Structure formats: C-alpha cells, structure tokens
C-alpha cells in the first residue's frame, strides 16, 4: 500500500488544457482526472501524477476570487521540485522539457551539494527544479 503524499502542489495556470498537454510531453505526466468548469472552456480541477508524485492544477477563476497564474516573464516565487534517482534522469527530463517548450534557467550541472541539478520555467510561468544525487566516489 502506497503512503499518501503529504504535500501536493496546486498550480493555477492560464490555459489548463494546454498545461496538461505540456506536462505530459515535458515531464511524462499521467492524467488521473480532469473536471471542466461550467463554461466548458476552463478546467476547475485536474489531478496529474509526475515522477510518482501528485500535482493538482486549475485555470484562473477571477470571478470567484481564486488564485492568479504567475505573470508571464515574471520571476516565480515558488518552484516545483522533482527528485530523481539518477543524474541521467535530470538530463533526460531537462531536454524533454526544453524540447516541449520550457525555458532553461540553469542547464544540468553537478553541484556542491553532490547532486545533478537543473531549473526550468514552463510556458505557464511556473519554475521547475530537477535534482538527483550524484553517485558516491570511493
């Protein structure tokens, strides 16, 4: 039995249908559910699985006082971190995300904290950090 994830990021985007498609291409997301809004255009709630963890998202609903999506070209105040088991997964995912339309903030590199690390901004203004431990050297 898998333990429930205790913290689940919930992203607000402009264009949730497009964001879901992007997350599938960029991060290999699996779509678990999608609840359309009454207007038939926006998404009220979506549930995705990325790299074994949950991610929720929805469109903006300013008429209900909901959250706003990040400003395009702005500096996102929060990041979603993906933890991988091997450095090769950081490199592969980084390339896959850039090829899908993410903007590179930091290309994959080995860090002082003994990890392979990269950062991206998705087309919807959210920052993603990719991290994997480096193999121990004897």
Image (tube, grey):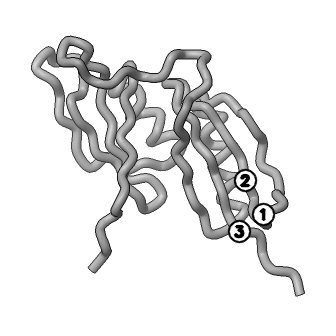
Determine the secondary structure under disc 1. Answer: loop
Callout in the foreground (1, 3): 1
For label 2, the residue is 117
What percent of the width, then of the height, locates residue 7? 37, 56
* Residue ranking furthest to the top: 63
Residue at image coords 61%, 39%: 97
For label 1, the residue is 113
Taking depth in this image into account, of 125 and 19 the one nearest to the observer is 125
Determine the secondary structure under disc 3. Answer: strand
- Comes first in the chain, label 1 or label 3: 1
Residue at image coords 76%, 39%: 106
- Label at residue 133: 3
Mark 1 vs mark 3, CA separation in Å:
9 Å
Horizontal relation, residue 64 to residue 21: left or right: left
From this view, report whether residue 126 is shown above or below residue 50. Answer: above
What percent of the width, then of the height, locates residue 109? 82, 52
Taking depth in this image into account, of 5 and 108 the one nearest to the observer is 5
- Comes first in the chain, label 2 or label 3: 2
- Mark 3 Cα-neighbour bin, 10 Å: few <14, some 14–19, many ≥20: some
- Label at residue 83: none
- Mark 1 Cα-neighbour bin, 10 Å: few <14, some 14–19, many ≥20: few
Mark 2 vs mark 3, CA separation in Å:
9 Å
Q: Does the CB distance between marks 1 and 3 fall below 8 Å?
A: no
- Mark 2 Cα-neighbour bin, 10 Å: few <14, some 14–19, many ≥20: many
Q: Does the CB distance between marks 2 and 1 fall below 8 Å?
A: yes
Q: Quadrant of residue 127?
A: top right
Mark 2 vs mark 1, CA separation in Å:
10 Å
């Amino acid at each position: 039995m898998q333990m429930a994830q205790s913290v689940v990021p919930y992203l607000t985007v402009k264009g949730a249908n497009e964001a879901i498609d992007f997350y599938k291409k960029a991060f290999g997301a699996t779509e678990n559910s999608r609840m359309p809004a009454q207007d038939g255009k926006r998404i009220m709630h979506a549930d995705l699985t990325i790299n074994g963890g949950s991610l929720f998202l929805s469109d903006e609903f300013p008429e209900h006082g909901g959250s706003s999506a990040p400003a395009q070209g702005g500096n996102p105040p929060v990041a979603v971190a993906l933890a991988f088991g091997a450095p090769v997964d950081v490199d592969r995912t980084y390339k896959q995300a850039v090829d899908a339309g993410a903007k590179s903030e930091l290309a994959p590199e080995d860090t002082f904290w003994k990890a392979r690390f990269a950062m991206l901004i998705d087309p919807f203004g959210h920052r993603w950090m990719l991290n994997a431990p480096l193999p121990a050297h004897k």
